[in-house]
Amino acid sequence: MLLYNVAITLYDLAAYLLFPFSRKPRKMIKGHWVVYDLLRQQREENADYIWFHAASLGEFEQGRPMIEEIKRRHPDKKILLTFFSPSGYEVRKHYEGADIVCYLPFDKPHNVRKFLDLARPSMAFFIKYEFWKNYLDELKRRGIPTYSVSSVFRKDQVFFKWYGGLYRKVLHDFTCLYVQNELSRRYLAKIGVTDVKIAGDTRFDRVLEIMHSAKELPLVEAFCGGGQVLVAGSSWQPDEELFIRYFNEHPGMKLIIAPHVIDDLHLVDIINRLKRPYVRYSKATPEKAAKADCLIVDCYGLLSSIYRYGTMSYVGGGFGVGIHNTLEAAVYGIPVIFGPKYQKFVEAKELIETGGAFTISNYAALEALLDRLVSDKEFLTKSGEAAGHYVVSRAGATEKILEDITL
């Protein structure tokens, strides 16, 4: 316990030391400064607050179906939403589905007590990989029901190591862990954690919601013109080196690039690689788009709607720390391609097993795969149908969890 608290204190100190030099720590620390005043000002005295905590934007999207379904069923309930990362908070700080949105103060005992004294939630939901020991210990001590949602457990995690005793104890703080799959339940059972139920992944519910409310984008429709279109989403430079090369060498295919990082340096790098006509989304008209072969999406918030216009998709990140959201593409019934670093993502492995996704590790593999998808219509259709069916077949986690919990 002492080592854990020391580690958190050092993390806190590091953030303060980086404050003058880095925008992300600066935003986080400034957000922490106002948390307690924000709770004092915004919390309604006699209201019933349900607390959702998400590390960042991806985890928020996982929790979002539950938040919105709770609000629909119980409009009298209030939602407190907290984030650890600025990349989640800064994007969703004005999210209308929550009544209070703020940062979660660092997991130090004094912070924990002060936060819970002010927030006073009736229950708490931690999304996927959030296991803050002091918060969870204090929630259990106060008798506040606490749930882990859409969590996944693997044998390489610290809970299952010989030195993971402290962390294993944290798992007993949860009233119930709603895990994604049977394998997670088995790993937990081996270390004596039995308050576990298999509910699936709420992200499937979320991407189906997004699909049904996807934006009509006339500019993108004009660009596609009914031809073969590869939509490359959340791409990084190693991804772009491969699919841009294919695009340059195959004039029959159009390309939409929605890079993960949108800044001038990255956009210039993309443009310098292109050998065919391109247009940037922010500077395009439907007429200009129709004449281009490559559409560069240089703004945020459109990717989940753009996938619907693709014939096939490439999801970036697989040559770095790990792939991004494959379900956003698969839900539209198109094949999904990604790099080799996907092993930590259950849905990626299952998409490959069902035939809806493919992994590549070099240009030769990508070229062979795209050539087949372009030339073999039956293969393209079956792959896309497999991807779409996979998403639909895994939906329903939100309903399973809420049916199991008394609100």
Image: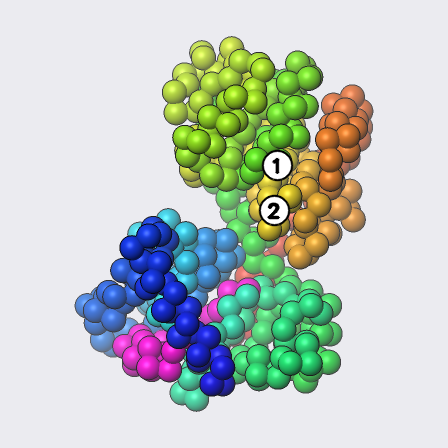
Residue 127 vertical placement versus 393 (above, below): below
Residue type for callout 2: Gly
Callout 1 crowding tier (Cα within 10 Å): few <14, some 14–19, many ≥20? some
Q: Of 399 and 303, which appears nearest the observer?
A: 303
Q: Is residue 255 left or right of residue 285?
A: right
Residue 38 vertical placement versus 339 (above, below): below
- Residue 129: image quadrant is bottom right
Give the Cα distance between marks 2 and 1. 8 Å
Q: Is residue 319 left or right of residue 79?
A: right
SS under mark 1: helix
| Mark found first going from the N terminus, 2 or 1 | 1
Q: Which residue is mark 1?
A: 238
Q: Is residue 9 left or right of residue 350?
A: left
Q: Residue at x 46, y 61 (%)?
A: 55
Q: Residue at x 46, y 28 (%)?
A: 267
Residue type for callout 1: Pro
Q: Quadrant of the C terminus?
A: bottom left
Q: Which residue is mark 2?
A: 320
Res 248 visible? yes
